[in-house]
Image: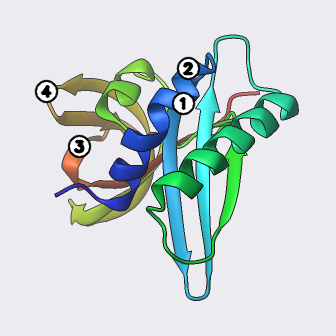
């Protein structure tokens, strides 16, 4: 069964891609009476405020028609940024050799949150190099959140 983020992605992807952008990911934060839907868009030459505004108008119209979220929420359209969240295994593969902050659903080797360099992706197994010479293998399905560490 698909979660709300997957349902929203399926509904919004044609609109976002039809406008010439990549739907990088969707994050729905339900926090009591205040909920926020964040739609991350990307394109090769970067995202502008006007891009976010244009996509926001179109996405808002689609969401009004589809009525997937039946209660009040705020809509944000954003670039993934330099410290982008990673939403898919394919996105993970794009950032082999990059440092990431990772949070796991279940600890591996007594480690639940860590910073490491993604060394490899083999099927659904991610290998991170931690401080020193330590490596940590993690199933992609165990990753709760992964975010790139920006390089300036």
Tell me, for residue 18, which label it has, or none.
2
What element does badge 2 sit on? helix
Q: Looking at the picture, how far across and down is residue 15, in whole percent?
A: 54, 30
Q: How is the image coloured?
A: rainbow
Of the numbered discs 4 and 3, the one sitting upstream in the chain is 4
Instruction: Write down the quadrant of residue 34 in the picture.
Output: bottom right
What element does badge 4 sit on? loop
Instruction: Write down the quadrant of residue 42 in the picture.
Output: top right
Residue position for label 1: 15
Task: For marks 3 and 2, give the CA distance.
Answer: 30 Å
Q: Looking at the picture, how far across and down is residue 135, in whole percent?
A: 27, 38
Q: Nearer the viewer, residue 13 or 134?
A: 13
Marker count (numbered): 4
The residue that appears at 64% across and 11% down in the rendered structure is 44
Check the picture and name the quadrant holding the N terminus: bottom left
What element does badge 3 sit on? helix
Label 3 neighbour load within 10 Å: few <14, some 14-19, many 20+: some
Residue position for label 4: 123
Tell me if label 1 and label 3 are in contact, CB under 8 Å.
no
Tell me if label 2 and label 1 are in contact, CB under 8 Å.
yes
Tell me if label 3 and label 2 are in contact, CB under 8 Å.
no
Q: Looking at the picture, how far across and down is residue 70, in whole percent?
A: 49, 73
In the image: residue 145, left or right of residue 110 = right
Task: For marks 1 and 3, give the CA distance.
Answer: 28 Å
Task: For marks 4 and 3, give the CA distance.
Answer: 9 Å
The residue that appears at 56% across and 46% down in the rendered structure is 62
Tell me, for residue 140, which label it has, or none.
3
């Amino acid at each position: 069964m698909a979660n709300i983020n997957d349902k929203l992605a399926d509904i919004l992807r044609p609109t976002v891609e039809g406008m010439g952008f990549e739907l990088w990911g969707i994050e729905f934060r339900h926090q009591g009476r205040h909920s926020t839907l964040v739609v991350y868009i990307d394109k090769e030459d970067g995202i502008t405020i006007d891009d976010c505004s244009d996509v926001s108008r179109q996405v808002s119209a689609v969401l009004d028609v589809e009525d997937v979220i039946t209660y009040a929420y705020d809509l944000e359209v954003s670039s993934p940024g330099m410290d982008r969240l990673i939403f898919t295994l394919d996105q993970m593969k794009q950032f082999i050799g990059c440092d990431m902050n990772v949070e796991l659903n279940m600890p591996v080797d007594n480690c639940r949150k860590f910073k490491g360099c993604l060394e490899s992706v083999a099927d659904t197994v991610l290998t991170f190099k931690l401080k020193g010479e330590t490596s940590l293998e993690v199933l992609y399905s165990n990753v709760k959140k992964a975010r790139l560490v920006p390089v300036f």
